[in-house]
Image: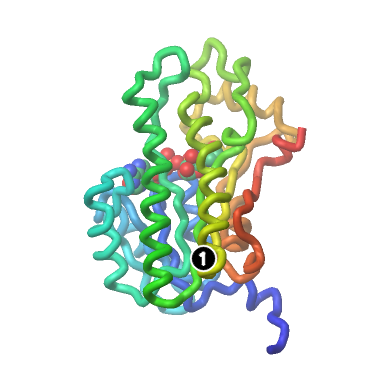
Amino acid sequence: MPEKTVQQLYDLKGKTCLITGASGYLGKAMAHALAEAGGRVIVTSRDQNRAKKIAAQLPDPNHSNHIGGILDYMDFDKLPDQFQTITDQVDAIDVLINNGHEHCPNDWKDISGTQFTKVLSNATGYFLLSRLTYELAINTGSPASIIMLGSMYGLVASYPDAYKDLIPASSVAYHTLKGGILQMTRHLATYWAEDLVRVNSLSPGPFPSESANQEMVERLKSYSPMRRMGFPEELKGAVVFLASDASSYMTGQNLVVDGGWTAN
Ligand SMILES: NC(=O)c1ccc[n+]([C@@H]2O[C@H](COP(=O)([O-])OP(=O)(O)OC[C@H]3O[C@@H](n4cnc5c(N)ncnc54)[C@H](OP(=O)(O)O)[C@@H]3O)[C@@H](O)[C@H]2O)c1
């Protein structure tokens, strides 16, 4: 077999990529990245119309017809049927991006047990959707790449001074969740590698949206070696790398895109 060129390695033509949270700040950029790299994108949202609208706005260089579908990964009972409805429309799922996140703003001072458990349920949803994708890959006999959105806050502790007297600190439940997602990545990767299903994490550093508290953003900048926050487009290359054959010998790893934050 001739060696693939770098363009061929990164090309997502012919690959079907399902992404959750595609309506969000980072998910929108990642959905665009998958489409721009030539993939067929299944945009999912808890809102059917929102999913269809975003799918219709994506570039489609290969005329592969992106799909918008309803999917709530926190509704564990309905999830298998929702997944089936979506996958009935395609031959296989080559790429799954577990990117959605159901937020809870409360920090360690006042988060309730119910709220804490709900945040952790994001991991349950990531797992169930990954397993459905794995089972489909086995049934269709096609390899798959699963990407879990972690966070630098799954690697490092919070920064109390960045939040003090402004807003609640980064959530203890969020740190617990994202650390767990990195470990789930390693666990599933070792079980599924033989079946050609790769599992990796992508951990962004600070990418605050415009609605974030600007004083907090200024404080965060002072912690960053680059002295700035990330922009959503700065995740596009990483997500295409993990989704594509460019990362075909990589599984169980965590790719950190954080402006050097965790290098300290
Ligand atoms: N922004 C950052 O600085 C940063 C840093 C590190 C890691 N991350 C991680 O990156 C990912 C994206 O972050 P973001 O800032 O783009 O978040 P965001 O703007 O708040 O978007 C989150 C998305 O999750 C979807 N969602 C929520 N609950 C869901 C559920 N039960 N089922 C399916 N989808 C659900 C929502 O879509 P619908 O309402 O359309 O369903 C929403 O678009 C998250 O996993 C986050 O933890 C973000």
How far across and down, in percent of the image, does residue 34 sit? 51, 64
Q: Quadrant of residue 16?
A: bottom left
How far across and down, in percent of the image, does residue 203 sit? 59, 44
Residue at the spot 66% in from the left edge and 75% down from the top edge: 7
Residue at the spot 37% in from the left edge and 74% down from the top edge: 139
- Give the residue pinned by disc 1: 197
Q: In the rendered image, which quarter contains the C terminus? A: top right
Residue at the spot 39% in from the left edge and 19% down from the top edge: 111
Amino acid at the residue labelled 1: Val
How far across and down, in percent of the image, does residue 76 sit? 28, 47
Q: Residues within 10 Å of mark 1 (few under 14, many from 20)?
A: many
Q: Nearer the viewer, residue 115 or 41?
A: 115
Q: Secondary structure at mark 1?
A: strand
Looking at the image, residue 135 sits to the left or right of residue 70; the answer is right
Q: Is residue 3 above or below residue 127?
A: below
Colour treatment of the image:
rainbow
Which quadrant of the figure shows ligand 1? top left
Count the marks: how many? 1
Q: Nearer the viewer, residue 118 or 135?
A: 135
Residue at the spot 50% in from the left edge and 47% down from the top edge: 26
Q: In the rendered image, which quarter contains the N terminus? A: bottom right
Q: Nearer the viewer, residue 125 or 86?
A: 125
Q: Quadrant of residue 226?
A: top right
Q: What residue occupies the far top of the structure in this picture?
A: 165
Is the CB of the residue bearing disc 1 within 8 angstroms of ligand 1? no
